[in-house]
Image (cartoon, rainbow, N blue to C red):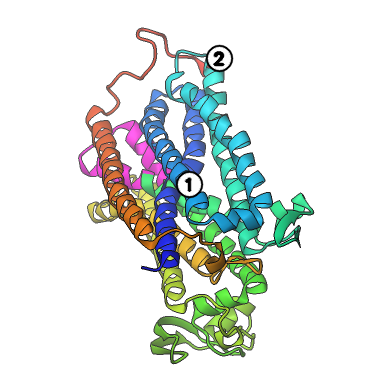
Amino acid sequence: MDPLILSRMQFGANISFHILFPTITIALGWVLLFFKLRYNATNDSAWMRAYFTWVKVFALSFAMGVVSGVTMSFQFGTNWPHYMEKVGNIAGPLLAYEILTAFFLEAAFLGIMLFGFRRVSNRIHTLATVLVAGGTTLSAFWIIALNSWMQTPAGFEIRDGVAHAVDWWAIVFNPSMPYRLVHMLLASGLTVSFLIAGLSALRYLTGDRSESMWKALRTGVFTAAILIPIQIVAGDQHGLNTLEHQPQKIAAMEANWNTGPNVPLVLFALPDEAAKENRFEIAIPDGASVVLRHSTSGVVPGLNDYPGNHPPVFPIFWSFRIMVGTGVLMLLVSWSAAFFLKRRHSLPKPLAMLMVPMALSGWLATLAGWYTTEIGRQPWLVTGVLKTADAVGPVAGSHVALTLTIYLILYVLLLIAYLGVLVHLALKAAKDGDNSPLPGVLNAPMSQPAAGE
């Protein structure tokens, strides 16, 4: 058993599980703030019922993200020790900034956000929600900065075989960082929008017509309908940036073997790296040139220009198409739901039934996008600085196989439990409707935010 392959599988499984939860908390914090601000403006308790339904999801997702993040950090020392030896002077401070500025901010005010309603003033509770939401975004900022630096490193020099920081501004705001950050924040927004819309649709199908359900449903649907076209534009710009800095990744995404103009956009194919060709190809003539160069005669890089230095084609090609295909489906569903909610103030049952499984569509698109990004960096762990094969430590393959098996079993069980809790919360909210008492001090008066405190 090759410890390199097993270590990559283990880290891939760990980060795939981990990223599910920050993808939710990053945007959900801002949705909760929206619910709270709407309550502050209207004093309509339905907004707070929506808030408390989804703040439970936030708390659970936050806890799952912290736990899975800790196990992931262990692997830097056990499986990938040469990574920190080579680039620890840069990776270490960025990870520390994330903990010192973002995690502590979230942890310090999460308790007030969860349990402070009607125990502290309304302004303090709102401020806690603002700070927690800001903390999740700040956390994403630092992690994306590090990941982007690994893709497009800048602002450093190599001395005695070790990377040393020269310009922290260039390190943090490296060439791909702004594009990746925007793309990830929008991905989080879409993930949360579809999760809220999907679980609200489940409540709708059970007969729940409470105001809190309608408010959550409309928030999810209309937010998704607005964000998806913005994400398409952001994705296009991100692709152009990747074309400039990582052309071999683009070549693999398009399964394009030879550099040249008039390159077709391949919709379906089975890339064959041994034969350097695509089997069963279905393509749109000149499509890739138009998308990437905005001209039918635009030159698109080919894989044959990067012998031995390009990522595996098959997984990149298909993960990218899964991401795009899921995005198109999200566009159709969100716009259809927005149409019916706007014009008819209801949802057709077939559409509501489709929206329930679409609750996880953001996860699927995000994972496919991350696989495209991370596998597309191979054979490098840090582009041009450290190859993946050179970063793995002297760990026995049998040990990695054992821990990988344990991780996979644990992750599957935790994911099943997590999804079960989400469904339970949705069904409980549907059962309670708008009749259950709001959390807080018993017999305490509802705060009057409009009048100020």
Front residue of this view, candidates 261 and 4: 4
Instruction: Quadrant for the C terminus, please.
Output: top right
Badge 1 crowding class, 10 Å Cα cut-off, few under 14, some 14 to 19, many 20 or more, is: few
Say whether residue 152 is left or right of residue 285: right
Location of the N terminus by quadrant is bottom left
Specify start and end residues of the magenta stretch as a single range.
196-223
Residue 188, compared with residue 157, is above or below; it is above
Q: CA distance from mark 2 to mark 1?
A: 50 Å
x 60%, y 88%: residue: 259
Per the image, is 334 magenta? no
Q: Specify whether residue 327 is in view.
A: no
Return the mark for residue 74. Answer: 1
Q: Position of residue 266 (x, y in %)?
A: 46, 82
* Direction from residue 391 to residue 178 in the image, left or right: right
Residue positioned 71% across, 58% down in the render = 163
Within 10 Å of disc 2 (Cα), the crowding (few <14, some 14-19, many 20+) is few
Closer to the camera, 127 or 157? 157
